[in-house]
Amino acid sequence: MKTKNLSFHSLIGCIMCFSSVYAVCPDQTLLAPGTISGTTCGAGNDCLLRPSEDMEIEVEIPEDGLWTISLCGSEFDTYLYIGTDCGLQDACANDNSCANGASECYCLDLLAGPYIVTIEGFAETICGNFTLNVSSCQAGRSR
Ligand SMILES: [Ca+2]
Ligand SMILES: [Ca+2]
Ligand SMILES: [Ca+2]
């Protein structure tokens, strides 16, 4: 199991994501494998990874292994960041791995534990409906 250095990550999280001091992070949680849908429109620009409105979703990875975290099928041009705390991208960052500018981190080698997935738009005024899917690579996946 991964151990999390809270003070270190909180410090870095504050530097990279200033307004998370004032906002609630995460917005939602998801136990992997699974899917969650929502919208970033009206969700607030709480994380400064991009200047757009954003959603932060805590994804609980239940076991060490290869995991795909995907926004494929989302209805706008997304950016995807995956980190060990709010505002971080230390696990993965992706812009356009799937169609229509949507983002995917494919078969990441992850330790079990919580990760914060930040869903942003490619530009300040871009927001929309997203579908976040987290699946195990070992379970097989067509692409
Ligand atoms: Ca943002
Ligand atoms: Ca937000
Ligand atoms: Ca994109």
Image (cartoon, rainbow, N blue to C red):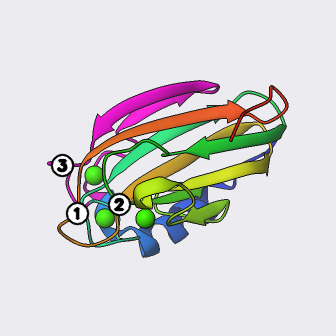
Q: Cα distance, mark 3 to mark 1?
A: 8 Å
Q: Secondary structure at mark 2?
A: loop
- Residue labelled with disc 2: 77
- Residue labelled with disc 3: 41
Given contact means CB atoms under 8 Å apart, are the residues at marks 3 and 1 in contact?
A: no
Q: Is residue 57 visible?
A: yes
Tell me the quarter of the picture where residue 74 sits: top left
* Residue 133 horizontal/vertical position (percent): 54, 34
- Which of the labelled discs sits on residue 126, or is there none? 1
Tell me the quarter of the picture where residue 140 sits: top right
Q: Cα distance, mark 1 to mark 2?
A: 7 Å
Give left or right: position of 81 versus 54: right
* Residue 109 horizontal/vertical position (percent): 82, 49
Query: Which residue is found at the position 30% from the left and 35% from the top?
Result: 38
Circle 1 crowding by C-alpha within 10 Å: few under 14, some 14–19, many from 20: some
Q: Cα distance, mark 3 to mark 2?
A: 13 Å
Query: Where are the magenta residues, as a range?
Result: 21-45
CB of mark 2 near ligand 3 (< 8 Å): yes
Q: Is residue 24 magenta?
A: yes
